[in-house]
Image (cartoon, rainbow, N blue to C red):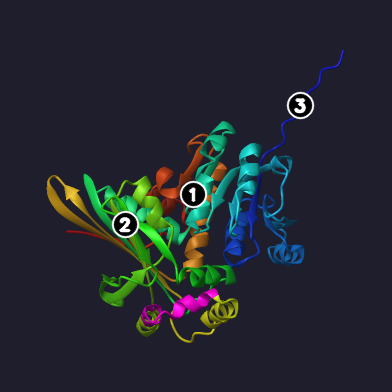
Amino acid sequence: MQFETSVKPIKDQIWVVGGYGQVGQMICTRLGKLFPGKVWAAGTRMNRAEEFSRSTGGAVLPLQLDVTKPVEPSMLRPVKLVIMCVDQSDTRFVEACAQAGTDYIDISAKYDFLAQVEQLHTKMQRSKSTAILSVGLSPGVTNLLVREATMHMDQVEEADITVMLGLGEKHGKAAVEWTVDQMNATYQVMQKGKPAEVQSFGDGKRIDFGAKLGQRKAYRFNFSDQHVVARTLRIPTVSTRLCLDSRWITRSMAISKRAGLFSLLRIPSIRNGTVKAFGLIPGGEPMYAVKVDAVGWENGEQIRVEQLLVGAKEADATAAVAAAVAERVYRTESELPHGVFHIEQCLSLQDIQDALHTPLKVTTKIT
């Protein structure tokens, strides 16, 4: 008489999709040192993946993968964690992860897509897997700074998030394309608990970035964090604004918006030319700054919490945060809840700081 035994495959691989891109390489390198031979740089171009794998001395392995095509859940059985560094147009691949019981982290910033992934909460719960969205600097650290600010209050009225990006940092093509595509966006934000329509590069506001960087005028921008924290942290009014470290380039972009020039970005040749031009802008520093200004009530008195973070490179910060979250998810069996969550729903800023090799320098002022 024969008994059939089903051997459960060892689930220990980490796939970084877009792993040979700018941020993906940094995530792979960090995780490859912690878990050598377990990390795979995945993407459509096998030659790029192999070249990168060689540069790591084989600590990171190459994998050809196209997430725009159907992926059998059986392929994902040995995979404990997927880190997504590329934009997707549908959730088929995330659904395959859910079916295979594979944890999932996403560093992308497209709210429409993240909202689709949220719908897979029950599927992820059923397969006892966890998806963490909004992982990086913005969204990501911005969400956590807002959560941190709300901890000082009984009731939160408003949170303003502002991101300053340095022109001296060379960003990956996908990041630049996303930024250019958002420059003419009309979108909805929450104002006093109701949706209100606003436009990118409108509604300028003076923001205090501290003694060194001074006051800067920043303009509305369609980052996903403002949409998410309004709901997850129950804040009636939330906005995210953007400025560049060059005051005159920020100002000239706002003037271009008012003059209607951004509407020309719908023309492919002008859009592509603008993407190229971003890589050629001279000067600027390889830096970033994030400011959160939150207003609310504590013990019947109005309170204002300001959080400021200044760092050297935005891409490095995104990669460091993603790797820190990935390490926690990979090493944890039961601590994190199952389902789909944004970073601030299951982790605190301190959780991230504890896992980073170099903690983020955050200063807090309460008045």
Q: Which label number is shown at residue 115?
A: 1
Specify start and end residues of the magenta stretch as a single range: 254-266
Q: Which residue is mark 2?
A: 238
- Binning the other alpha carbons within 10 Å of mark 3 as few (below 14), some (14 to 19) or many (20 upward) gives few
What residue type is disc 3 on? Ser
Instruction: Note whether 38 is above or below 164 in the view shown.
Output: above
Residue 25 shows in the view: yes
Question: Is 66 inside the magenta-drawn segment?
Answer: no
* Residue 346 relative to residue 91: left or right: left
Of labels 3 and 2, the one closer to you: 2
**Do labels 3 and 2 touch, CB within 8 Å?**
no
Return the residue nearer the eye: 219 or 142. 219
Q: Which label number is shown at residue 6?
A: 3
Nearest to N terminus: mark 3 or mark 2: 3
Q: Secondary structure at mark 2?
A: strand
What residue type is disc 1 on? Ala
Quadrant location, the N terminus: top right
Instruction: Note whether 64 is above or below 81 in the view shown.
Output: below
* Residue 119 relative to residue 36: left or right: left
* Residue 157 relative to residue 81: left or right: left
- Binning the other alpha carbons within 10 Å of mark 2 as few (below 14), some (14 to 19) or many (20 upward) gives many
Query: Marks 3 and 2, how far apart in space?
Result: 51 Å
Image-quadrant location for residue 203? bottom left
Question: Which residue lies at the image location 17% right of the left edge and 59% below the top edge?
Answer: 367
What is the magenta segment's predominant secondary structure? helix
User: Can you give x and y, in whole percent of width and height, for residue 276 in the image?
Assistant: 57, 80
Q: Which label number is shown at residue 220?
A: none
Return the residue nearer the eye: 212 or 155. 155
Q: Looking at this view, name the residue that lies furthest to the top.
A: 1
Query: Marks 3 and 1, how far apart in space?
Result: 37 Å
